[in-house]
Image (tube, rainbow, N blue to C red):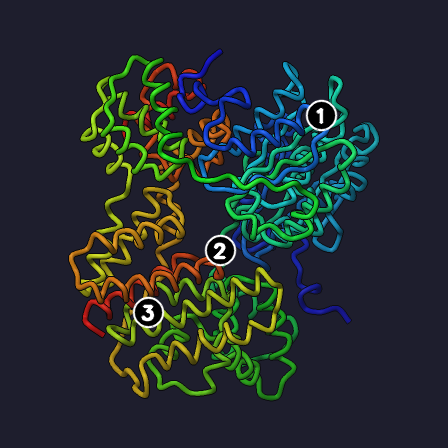
Amino acid sequence: MKSWVEKYRPQKLTELIGQEEAVGEVENYLETFPNVRRKALLLNGPPGIGKTTLVHVFAKENEYEIFELNASDLRNKKSMIEKLKPVLEQSSLFNKNKLILVDEIDGLSGTKDRGGGSELVSLIEDTKFPIICAANDAWIQKLSPLRKKVNIIELKDITPAETKNLLKKILEQEKKSINEKVLNQISIKARGDLRSAINDLEAAASMENPEEIFIDERNKKLDIFKAMRHIFQDKANKEMLGTFDKVDMQMDEIILWFEENIPKAYSGEDLAKAYQRLAKVDLFKGRIYKQQYWRFLVYENIFGSYGISQAKGDKEITEFKKYSKPTRILKIWLNNQKHGKKKTIAIKYAKKTHVGYKRIMAQWNEIKHQLKNPMIQKELKLDDDEINYIMKY
Amino acid sequence: MTSEIWTEKYRPKKFDELAGQEAIVKRVGALTNSLNIPHLLFAGPAGTGKSTLALIVVKELFGENWKDNYLELNASDERGIQIVREKVKDFARTKSLGNVPFKVIFLDEADALTPEAQQALRRTMENYAATCRFILSCNYSSKIIDPIQSRCATFRFKLLEKKDVEKVIKRIAESENLEIDEEAITSIYESSEGDCRRSVNIMQSTASVSPKITKDLVSTIASEARPKEIKIVLEYALSGDFKGAREKLLDVMLKESISGQDVIKQMQKEIWNLTIEPELKVKLTEKTGEAEFRIVEGSDPFIQLQALLASFVLAGLGK
């Protein structure tokens, strides 16, 4: 028996929910190919929103043959060449409508798929056939070379109402019913991921008490604000040690949230103590990294949860505290925007003077006067933007 | 073409021009003359002549063709050992030109590599031993793993003395028609802390303002170069304003692109300039030392620095 996800996968473009714009862009791209400015498309959007389905349905309706690569294929440089190159280079006489789909490109693993990303970039440059890539997050660092070569199409978010509509239609066809409250919960929780919504619906429909589907969920997920409130404000207890397991976030990111918000919860001696303990978390993180001794994770966890909570002693804090998103990453980003030229200048200067560019950046104030000299600017082959930067700062 | 950047224009080109490292120059010179050098490890502070000596070695070995036979990499700039390996591989693939049977790779700041990365480097050194010689430079040889140390002839560069830096400064002053007095020389030497490259840079910056270099001018330029803001960060913390100190710290680190280690070094120095009780100075220094240790061991210097600032707030309150 087919799962509902398979059974109700859209067969026609008209059955796709909320992606008319994206469909139009794909159509436009395929019609004009190869006379396009960027040789490939990148569909960007969260899981289960219909990226892969869109391409398949489109191909079916317009009689394209799809050649597909996804995360299950090993995509290092060698296998990428072996698999894709023959397809890309084949003469177009016999396979007039061929389309290459490279799915889940943000899943290119750093180690196993080494070189795969850069190989994909060079394949795109030479391709005789349209290439469509799909990603959950096209804006991650490792995809930046690829971003320059593709036209990025953002898929539209699917609202809980749209999700609920679809679920209702499925229930109708299956001749089943589920109470409204559960239906709402499923639709909201899915956050636009139709695949998971349909899976949840199928599970809920087969249960005697469909509410139970959320019990497990409630135990599992804890948002970061609640996690902070729990650790910063509740009285320290041993159960806190499990807090980070329930937060759907990497430890590195949790550390950033804590770093930002400790001063909002604590002050004085408590604050100092809490930072000492956060510093311990970082210390063990460094040791894990350097020595690859993973048991240190235990200490990272204890200092990060119980340790920070206990920094305030036996107390609990009942008043409402407002916590906020970490700003450090944003500040770093803004700074890079503003002082990006400093780095490109430092790289040129460093190369000329046999030094590391980081050292040049750190000793900027000692060399910046030299950079005002036009002869030196010429010698370093600085461009206009870089010269402007020097004159401004 | 000669460079307009003085650190390049006046970089020593022959063994006997290198200031302050006579014993090393003699031994390395002899090795170079035999046309067969082992792997070399140059350990010592910044601006004492490590890169310069490496350049002299390759120029002596290869003459005009030195650029074809020499690859310079900086371990703290290159992202990861993988990049280093790939570059080394590409470079080592072709044979050297001329009558020296090997090429030379200079890996600067090799102590920036983690021990694992150094293990990988060691294998790379072995794989290309027939066609390549490595010259590694580092600040501390203790941060280089034993297997690499044992494959290299190690040379320890010492900090330049005042008379060495003075010689360099006077040579440049003469050639650039600058007027400079004894006091100004002392000031340049002191603010660059024996780092010859920094001495020359400070000198060029000063000269870009006036051809008459005085002590006052040097200290204006040099103090501008030193982020004053670190002192402000400390003052915020000691006055009890943690949030202000934290924000200022991040701003300084970003604006001046300085690392956590640069910051803590600066803090340790600034403690002496604060108007506080001697007892407190000792206490703060102790905490700073502890934090510096943790920055080396840990992974995110900014977190360690915040913890330090929070403890300064307490210390400022007499706790």
Q: Which amino acid does label 1 sit on?
A: Ser
Q: Nearer the viewer, residue A292 or A198?
A: A292
Which label sits in the foreground, 1 or 3?
1
- Pointer 3 residue: A262
Please provide percent x and percent y for residue B214: 20, 26
Instruction: Indicate left or right for B223 with A97 as reference.
Output: left
Instruction: Indicate left or right for A81 with A344 as reference.
Output: right
Please provide percent x and percent y for residue A147: 55, 39
What label does residue A157 carry, if any? 2
Please provide percent x and percent y for residue A125: 66, 30
Q: SS at mark 1? A: loop
Q: Which amino acid does label 2 sit on?
A: Asp
Q: Nearer the viewer, residue A136 or B270?
A: B270
Q: Are marks 2 and 1 in contact (CB under 8 Å)?
A: no
For the N terminus of chain A, the quadrant is bottom right
- Pointer 1 residue: B34
Please provide percent x and percent y for residue A49: 57, 57
